[in-house]
Amino acid sequence: MSTSGFYELYRRSTVGATLVDALDTLISDGRIEASLAMRVLDTFDRVVAETLKDKTQSKLTFKGHLDTYRFCDDVWTFIIKNCSVKLEQTEDPQGNTVIVDKVRIVACNSKKTGE
Amino acid sequence: MNDLQAAINLIETLYSPHPPSNVIEIQQQLQAAQRSEHGFEFASQLLSKEDGSANVTYFGALTLAVQFNINTTSEGLLAILKLNMLHLMRFSKLYVLNSREHGSRMVVIKKLMSNAAQIFFRINSSNDRSSSLEWNNPIETFCLLVSSPEISPDAFNDVFTHAMSQHVPYEHLMQLINSSPEFNVLVLLFIEVVIEDLVKHQSGKVSASPLHATVHEYMYISSTAVINQNLQSLAIAFQGKSAEKPGISNNIFRCVNAWINYTIMARSKSFGTMDLSETFENIIRLMCLYDSTQGFPYSETVVSILGEIFANDPTILSYDLRSAIEGIFLGVSMASNNETNGHEWMLNYMNHLVINQMHDELKDLALCVVDFLQISNLGVCNNLFTQASAGDSRNLDQYIKVLLQMTNFTLVPVLEEFFSVRMVDFWLDLCDGYNNLVRETFKPETPELASNLFGQVVEIYLPKTRLTNKQKILEEGEDETLLHEFDDFRNAVLDLIESMWSVLGNEKLTNNLIAGIGHLTPNSGDDLFQIEAMCFSLNRLLTDMNLGDSPVICATLRESTSFLTNILLLVQTGCQQKSAANGKEAQILSTDFVKTGTSLLATVADYIKQNDEDLANCMDIMFSSLEQCGNADETDIKIELFLTKCTTKICETSRMKLASYLPTFTKIQNAMVQQSSKVSDFTKQKFTRCLGYIIQDYTRDGPEAQAHYLATVINTIQDEISNPQADRAQILCLLNCFSELGSAMIPPEEPEDSNNLLSAAQFNEYWKADPLHLRDVTSNLLEKVLSQFERDSEFIEVACLIMGKKLSLTEDEPHFLAYSMQELMQFLLKRCVECEPTTGLPYIVYLLGNVVSHYGASLSSQDFGFMLSKFFLEQHREAIAHDPDLTQMMITFVNSVLEKRPSLVIHCEHWSTFIIPEFLGFLVSKERFTISAVTKFWTKVVNNKKFSRHDEVTICEQVCAVGPQLTTQTMGGLLHAQRSDLNYYSDFLRALVARYPLQSKQWLTAALPTLCDNPATHQLLIEKLFVTRGSRAASNAVLEWWLTCNGLPRLTS
């Protein structure tokens, strides 16, 4: 978890990784300080978490073979093989089913552990 | 900038409502002045100007902030702090004396407070602890300075130095804040500014433990004393019936919020616990204040504060406080018989919100209460269901009763109330908790209790998910957000019902729903809404069941006489009401009716096929409903789509029973694919697929009869394509219909009729001979179309799909499109010559990949070399080299063969002349797609389990020969790669180091110094790479090296 209290896991998403690459370029070019880059990423962590929580309506369901699961340091990891992912999009009545060989789900606790 | 007046003019221009065009130039001039060595004097002059406007003095405060950021010495810092505090004191005194006249200075005061906070953080942060400066409590210093008698600027130094180290006793502090409301406001504001900035400041620092320790030891005590005193004053003012809410209450609650946020953050970083219990007691007391004249002055604010806490870090409240809140919210405490003071407030507050239709406030209360309940969900679960129960059984009964009442809130969910919406999560968690309990811990009555409880919950939620509620939302004319929220609520209830199935089982849930649908004789719209809600839930329960293997469920379905009739009625009603003339509201509800009905029909397709009459009924209604669709509007299109999907599923499942429909289907399909037909392209294609399913299973009269039907469909498509009126869209749609026909002819994995297996050989022989020449007809048709659209990628795509239909089947499985490898290669080569590489080549290469995969065993390395030449190295070489997507496609093609038949690749003519040198070059590419593919290629080269002994020896020699160059290219590419691409390289490096440990060490030792001068880092990387085993460790080693060589920070905490 970052110092601002939000997980850093979305930094590994395409948009997060691209932001990190862009910040690297700005630091290398001497246009921003590293500390500003850290602030930007902290804000990114917060905004992504809040936006996904508050602004998204799409849902997806998946079915497949649960190959591996583990719970370590308050983080669940599931690896699902031969997975069929069904996207339930409100705007698209056709819906879409995607068949994938492997899905990895990393799930962190949205709240701190209780007493 | 020497002239102060000129600077002031520039500042006023900068902040004017209509800045001039050269505003950037002005900004740059002023910034230069702020950063200059005279910046400090500049700030001092601006702040000291007696007649200075708020803009000018604010700019002075801003200049001090700039100076603070560029000044690193402790002497400089102290001078800035003194100047800052001098003016903060001066402006604050003016405000205290006359807040009306000096109210506009508040923005300057706030900036000066923020500057003071930043300096306080710096003085107390870990890096500056060695300095001689010590400042423990800015709040007390501020109080002393502002309450001091007039001080001349010359005497300020001594006064400030004294105030910095002076402690203000509690009584004195209380006296000061009670001395004037303005003073009190300023103290609250300063606390808020410092604490809010502290939370922001923390996010940028790796470690600030000493600062937090100082805040904990000093500021925490004085701040909470001030806050609690103010909160108590609010309560006293209320009891004194002061008629209106004191204006200061917003300041106090902002301060409370800031402290809560900070305490949560500090707890998460293990800086120690700061107990805010007294503050919480005070705000809870304020929450519960109400009377007929003053209403509920603080309830909304405190509910919102508590809601935030319960959602983020509920354990910040002590157990006792949470018990008290439980009593207030529910009127009963699960674990004890404690007094439950305050519940009367809860009932009155809810009543007040409902009567006054304050739906947003009611929603906030629901969020707060349910989030609170979620905290102790596990405890509730244990108390209810296990022998470890600590509570009084009467209390538990009462507790459950309250929870059920809360769920059964008598307003429209989403539109008017959120309790039932939020309680879905609570019940879901409780149900999951119950399912996870160890059965041995159950009380004897637990299974019955659980089944009763969850049964009641289902009974409560079923009516709430009815579309009558959606209708009310539509009638209110609210925006679409509420509609989406209602749909989300319905889906959440589905999750809940699915979870409850594991407690209630088919007996108490599925069968009840089936019976509910089957025994109802709908007489009104309400009955239909009831049927829809039950169908909606039942569909989820049956989705995962294989009805073919569930005779008990099928028997229940059969007993429910009107089950299918009612679902079909739902579909029919939806189709009848879908016209735009009935209004938008009716259209939305019709769409839901058809969606639910068709989804359930598709789910129970295995049941429908068991009875010819049911099947006939369904097909008739599907056809008649489809007939009513004509692409009229969005609703019409959606409904047609649902009907088509359902028909396709029923045809796929019941193909064996539908043989008698073949002539009818063929006629309808013929009519449907005409250009004049109004049905959508999607329906045309899927209906052709439906027809294909029936033809596929029509084996009883031998292959000739099947071929006859296929020829009829193909002729229809061919005739329509030849129609001079047919435009591009129509021809493309017809080819897609053909492709759907080809897909439907692929035999199912588990054919129902075992005779099909026996006749497979006979059909296979027939299709090899192909007496009706359907393959030739097909390929001629494609050639004819492609002669017109040879560079149109959509046509190339569908043509490749049609030609490759048989490639997913084995040689023994029959299919009418069983083209030989030669025929496929001829087709592909022709397409390759004619196509536009950027858009068409990917489809051609996709089919080529399938050909290689299917006929791999009969291919030689010469064949592979030929493919490489024709498709990549001749005509399209330039295009591939310049297009990263095409480059990736080529590498991926090579990779796929390297993975399955590596000898085809490594012994082909282009291996040493093209693949090795070109793919070495791709390692320094800047394109992620190229890097991803090429690093996989090299990983497969150095480590491939499919290599024969001979391949292994050849590859070993070649890798050793190009090793130094391979390593230099890899590390060069890695050094200049983006951070997000590093893992691709590190995976390859791991493989190289593991496979060629001795050589790779030498190669790395030689290559790294040529890239950059950082011997220690290079050495560390080599050492780490050779001792790490895991992928993550290797990635970290590579990342460390990359960061050091590029001078970049880690960016993660």
Image (cartoon, coloured by chain):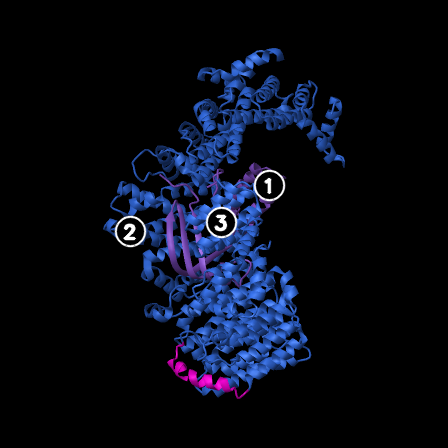
Chain colours: A purple, B blue
Label 1 or label 3, whichever lies nearer to me, is 1
Mark 1 falls within which chain? Answer: A
Q: Magenta segment, principal secondary structure? A: helix
Give the residue number, with chain letter if any, for mark 3.
Answer: B414
Mark 3 falls within which chain? Answer: B
Q: Name the amino acid type tagged 1.
A: Ile
Q: Mark 3: few, some, or many residues within 10 Å (few <14, many ≥20)?
A: many
Chain-order first, disc 2 or disc 3: 3
Q: Separation of disc 1 and disc 2 at Cα?
A: 63 Å
Residue nearer the viewer, B591 or B192: B192
Q: Judge whether residue B138 is colored magenta.
A: no
**Percent coordinates x, y for residue B69 in the rendering:** 60, 28
SS of the residue under disc 3: loop
Mark 2 falls within which chain? Answer: B
Q: Judge whether residue B752 is colored magenta.
A: yes
Could you tell whether B824 is left or right of B520 in the image? right
Residue segment shown in magenta:
B751-772
Asked if B142 appears above or below A27 in the picture, the reply is above
